[in-house]
Image (tube, rainbow, N blue to C red):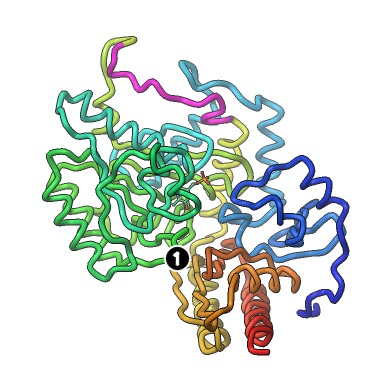
Amino acid sequence: MSTEPPSSPVVDPWVARDAAVVWHGFTQMSTYPDSTPVIVDRAEGRELIDVNGTRYFDGISSLWVTTLGHHVPELDAAVIDQLGKVAHATLLGNGSRVTVEFAEALAAVVPVADPHVLFGSDGAVAVEQALKVAFQYWVNRGEAGHHQFIALGGAYHGDTVGALSVGDGGFGTTLFEPLRFPVIRTPGYASADWAAKMVSCIEANAATVAAVVIEPLVQGASGMLMADPADLALVGEACRSSGVLLICDEVATGFGRTGKLFASEWAGPDFRPDLLCLGKGITGGYLPLSATVASGAVFEAFNGPDLSEATFYHGHSYGGNALGCAVALRHLQLMDEWDVLANVTSVAERLSSRLSDTVLDLPGVGAIRQRGLMAGVELAPPPGSTRWGRRVCAGAVGRGVVLRPLGDVVVIMPPLTTTWDEIDRVVDVLARSIETVWAEDAR
Ligand SMILES: Cc1ncc(COP(=O)(O)O)c(C=O)c1O
């Protein structure tokens, strides 16, 4: 396949129809039609196929959700089979068989002691639930004053108001400042001493803190910033010895992304979040489902008489959706049956060596950060150059690889079943796209 972008892009009537009625999130709609968006019609394996039949490798796993690939026969079958039973039944006051089965399977693998699964629909909901559970936990125990959260600089936990509050700046957050609740902020993974700062903050504020919130190992949305697992362990130990709850947001890192099923596992068996937030890859990228997994100790604090104030009065209409749980259950089985983590390790090594020998030394490249199949190539545009991340990724899309930047960091998050050949294709396309943008600005 040619790696040259098409010389005269065809104006797609689907883009006009799309822009006329669909309001795309995190997207400036006035310029959307001009940015040659890909309008997906179908997909095969790890390739998206647009309405014109053009194929693209899905280099960002459809915003970090796709794990095994698209249109996976086994996952398709799980949804179809569940459709023959029931698509959805509420979890408010009642149960659903497949949801029980998935919760049991999940409970067996999460790094949480005596886990209890509170379902939601998206990552931000999983975080929002964790914040409310942590807050109410202290109230239910009759221990007043634990109303603060400690969160990291550069944190991203989603775009609902609670998640925005524990998140740091960026992505238009500042605008909502009057709505955000105050948070104790310590330096993020960009600072070498982030863990020491967080540990002393935990110790100093233990009497008023409800929970510490972190993205274990990788701060994804702030540009793929990496933490040392030993530092994570220090924070976990400080939470435990100070009696402060630890919320681990594994919406991005969960389900094999980092080479272990959950990133928290890198910090050792003693690192056990009290609340674990899961989303994105939980259904392999098929259906919207998320979960907040609470430890038994947290869960117990909510037991009390019927209709009492100890109850967690929270739950969404589609939480624990049966179709989502059916595909999530099959997905978890396939992760094991296909030994997906072994592929992540092997392909991550390939990605690392190819990025080092093909991309790192290109003019316009500043740094490369990677953990498993989460990678960020930080561009270093020459002075006066603008929108480099956007332009490099547009070049990649034109060459048949979907990439999306975070500012001037190009994110590479391919599906976990990606092959070495596909990694080579992604890296070669990225290198050509960077060279092209560099040459344009050097003119
Ligand atoms: C660490 C983390 N938490 C939460 C979220 C929000 O997830 P969602 O977009 O599914 O609401 C994201 C999204 O990127 C994330 O990276």
Q: Residue at x 52, y 70 (%)?
A: 409
**Residue 388 is drawn in which quadrant?**
bottom right
Q: Taking 315 as reference, is 102 above or below it?
A: below
Q: Residue at x 77, y 53 (%)?
A: 40
Q: Which residue lies furthest to the top in this view?
A: 306
Horizontal arrangement in the rendering, residue 398 relative to residue 411 (left or right): right
Q: Which residue is drawn at 12% across and 50% down?
A: 203
Question: Percent x, y for residue 369?
Answer: 44, 73
- Residue under label 1, please give it: 224
Question: Percent x, y for residue 125?
Answer: 47, 37
* SS assignment at label 1: loop
Question: Percent x, y for residue 151?
Answer: 30, 50
Q: Residue furthest front?
A: 384
Q: Give the range drawn in magenta.
A: 308-321
> Three-letter amino acid code at disc 1?
Met
Q: Taking 220 as reference, is 125 above or below it?
A: above
Q: Taking 321 as reference, is 239 above or below it?
A: below
Residue 213 lies in the magenta-colored region: no
